[in-house]
Amino acid sequence: NYLVNGDPNDQSNQKGPTSPFSLLIPAYVYPKSNGQMAQAYKTLNQSAHLYPDIEHVIVLNPNNGYQAINPPNIDWAPVIDMFVETNKITNNIKLIGYVSTLYGDLDPAHEQTVKDQITGYYNDWSCTGVFYDETQGVGNNEQSQTLAMYQRYVDHANSLNDQSYTVFNFGSQSMIDD
């Protein structure tokens, strides 16, 4: 449960499942298989109906995030529409979009690509959060720059949706001091 605003004791002021249990599901499956919607997405949709008290946080990964700069194609659109419609009934699905941070790559062109992907997810893919993959720290010299870059990503997402959901998945090593 999370508060929309106001009094935490006011049950009408809360959204989401009543259970604190959430599933984070990296759905790294192309949406079609043999001309049909992939079974993985049908199973996730069924799970949302069968377990309405469990939040299903589904990570969409269109071509490692690069396809997110465009609206969903004819393969992705039915999957997203299905989850959006189910969520209107169950209120337990949160779609978040995959982006690769290339292990803390500080290149301004890559930073802009990530921001464009985030914008696409929020504007066209019905996402309410971002799954930042391949996050990693670097040594002391670049650590503050890397943290500032990650903060800019989160600030950008929050500028598009003030209820933005953020997940960081560390790569091969976490942010440590040298």
Image (tube, rainbow, N blue to C red):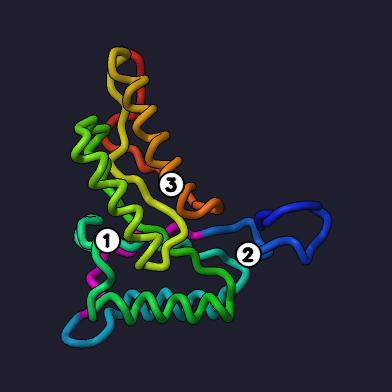
User: Label 3: few (<14), some or many (≥20) within 10 Å?
Assistant: some
Question: Gap between marks 1 and 3, in whole Å?
Answer: 17 Å
Q: Which residue is mark 2?
A: 16
Residue at x-position 75% and y-position 61%? 13
Label located before the other in sequence (1 or 3): 1
**Mark 1 or mark 3: which is in front?**
1
Say the numbered circle drawn on residue 167.
Answer: 3
Give the overall secondary structure of the magenta segment: strand
Residue type (three-letter) at the residue carrying disc 3: Val
**CB under 8 Å between callouts 3 and 2?**
no
Label located before the other in sequence (1 or 2): 2
Say the numbered circle drawn on residue 163.
Answer: none
Question: Gap between marks 3 and 2, in whole Å?
Answer: 18 Å
Residue at x-position 63% and y-position 64%? 16
Question: Gap between marks 1 and 2, in whole Å?
Answer: 26 Å
Residue type (three-letter) at the residue carrying disc 2: Gly
Q: Which residues are magenta?
A: 23-32
Query: Is residue 80 toward the left or the right of residue 162 in the image?
Result: left
Query: Height in image: 111 above or below 147?
Result: below
Tell me where residue 25 appears, x and y as whole percent.
40, 61
Query: Height in image: 57 above or below 83?
Result: above
Q: Secondary structure at mark 2?
A: loop
**CB under 8 Å between callouts 1 and 3?**
no
Residue at x-position 43% and y-position 48%? 157
Which one is in front, 25 or 118? 118
The quarter of the rendered structure image containing the N terminus is bottom right
Say the numbered circle drawn on residue 68.
Answer: 1
Tell me where residue 161 appears, x and y as whole percent.
50, 54
When asked about the image quadrant of residue 90, the answer is bottom right
Residue type (three-letter) at the residue carrying disc 1: Ala
Tell me where residue 51 appears, x and y as whole percent.
57, 74
